[in-house]
Image (spheres, rainbow, N blue to C red):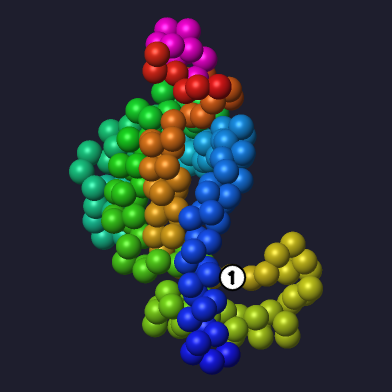
Amino acid sequence: MNNTSFTSLMAVVIDKLPGIMQLSKRSCDTAKCVDFLAPLLLRLYLAPVFWMAGTKKFANFSDTAEWFGNAEWGLGLPAPYVLVFLVALFEIVGALFLLLGFAIRPITLPLMIIMVVAAISAHIQNGWLAIATGSGIFATERTIGAIERLERAKEILQVQGDYQWLTENGALVILNNGIEFAATYFVMLLALFFLGGGRFVSADYWLARKYLPELAPRA
């Protein structure tokens, strides 16, 4: 394609661009009737995450508090028993609120704080990746070394163990414990803070319709 043809093509595209944008906008706007699905799916994804995190902390309360407070092999946080209680409580209450779609915007705030503290205190020193990988933009010396050890472990298991049985329910990996999950959950919670619980399938929507109709999302 010579310069004249390319210039003519670009002129046509630019001339048609407003119409294309209008068509695209109208096409996308037709999906607004199901816009409640986005916050609903975010809530249903996050609810079991926080429920499991909170109930696990209460089930192992003393051990978790020792890990929170110990500066040598734990997080070295102050008032560990109080912190574990508050974090677990907010996680469990948050899970229930997310499931019901109740007080979504307020409850995301303490949950986001928990994610930030968790990322800084427990994960950031390990980098981004949750699962170690030996390549890619997020790979580090730590994860590359982990993959070298994983390959060695696989070799040992293939020779001395029933490797097929060991891996029939999933591949062997090494947990890197980076900030990936905490950051992902933070972003999802941030989206819910701005979106709210969504129309039709949240308690917030129906309560607003009843008591604050002027503020309720339009159906």
180 above or below 196?
below
Q: Residue furthest left?
A: 78
Range of the magenta residues? 205-213
Where the C terminus falls, by quadrant?
top right
Instruction: Mark yes or no: residue 185 visible.
Output: yes
- Asked where in the image residue 199 lies, by quadrant, the reply is top right
| Residue 40 lies in the magenta-colored region | no
Q: Nearer the viewer, residue 55 or 106?
A: 106
Residue 79 percent across, percent down from the top left = 22, 39
Residue at image mark 1: 173
Q: Nearer the viewer, residue 33 or 36?
A: 33
The dominant secondary structure in magenta is helix
Residue 198 percent across, percent down from the top left = 51, 29
Mark 1 falls on what kind of element?
loop
Where the N terminus falls, by quadrant?
bottom right
Residue 209 percent across, percent down from the top left = 48, 12
Q: Residue at x 24, y 56 (%)?
A: 71
Q: Nearer the viewer, residue 95 or 45?
A: 45
Q: Residue furthest top?
A: 211
Q: Nearer the viewer, residue 1 or 151?
A: 1
Side (left or right) of 49 relative to 139: right
